[in-house]
Image: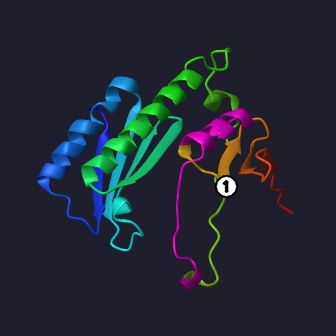
Amino acid sequence: MAHNLEISGRELEVTDRISEYVTKKVAKLDRYLNTIDEIFVDLAHDKAARSAIDRYVAQLTVRGKGFILRSEERADDIRTALDAALEKLTRQVARYKGKHQRGRGDGKPTAAISPETEPLPELEAEEPATIIRRKKFDLIPMAEEEAIEQMKLLGHDNFFIFFNAKASMINVLYRRRDGTYGLIEPHIR
């Protein structure tokens, strides 16, 4: 296992037995995709779930060079939820490998095509009390078609933020009500 594995629990104690089970199951992902850098496993017990079948939640996030894959499943047992999430993630890995092993055909990586850019300064929030969650993530230069595929792989139904390699700018890809996609190209005044 050449990747970093992080297991966390919310409203659930991650015992040694659960930790060993997770480690054993997650190690199998290396068979399918050997470029994994980090795997985050978030296990939770939702006491307020509407149904007893949805009490335990397993969320897996796999990060590697140029991709992020995520799956989440719910079940009445933590092991069942983890197995279902791993099965879903395995299908995503197979789909990702099928789409990206072929490449663009010119042999150049996306990073070599995109020009170097300066990072944007972080904006300060006027009212920090209104921000309830803050996320940071790496933007990987990609084409619009790749962004649509990443959006599908991550399970993001509404929007996806990415660095457009062709336009050399940050874009927001979103799904329209009719099932088509829209692209927001911001311009600074």
**Magenta region: which residues?**
129-153
Question: Which quarter of the picture shows residue 42?
Answer: bottom left
Picture quadrant where residue 48 is located: bottom left
In the image, residue 105 lies at what x, y percent? Answer: 67, 14
The residue at 29%/47% (across/down) is 80
Residue 108: x and y, percent?
64, 20
> In the depicted view, which residue is nearer to us: 40 or 117?
40
57 with respect to 161 (left or right): left
Residue 128, position in %: x, y? 56, 82
Which residue, given by chain and number where applicable, does mark 1 sit on?
158
Do we see residue 53 in this rendering?
yes
Q: Nearer the viewer, residue 112 or 130?
A: 130
Q: Quadrant of the N terminus?
A: top left
Q: Identify the residue at image location x=29%, y=58%.
A: 8
Residue ranking furthest to the right: 189
Q: Is residue 80 above or below residue 127?
A: above
Name the side, left or right, on which 25 lies relative to 165: left
- Amino acid type of the residue tagged 1 in the rendering: Asn
Q: Is residue 167 magenta?
A: no
Res. 117 visible in picture:
no
Query: Is-magenta flag for residue 149?
Result: yes
Q: Quadrant of the C terminus?
A: bottom right
Q: In the image, what residue occupies the spot 34% across and 32% down?
A: 29
Label 1 residue SS: loop
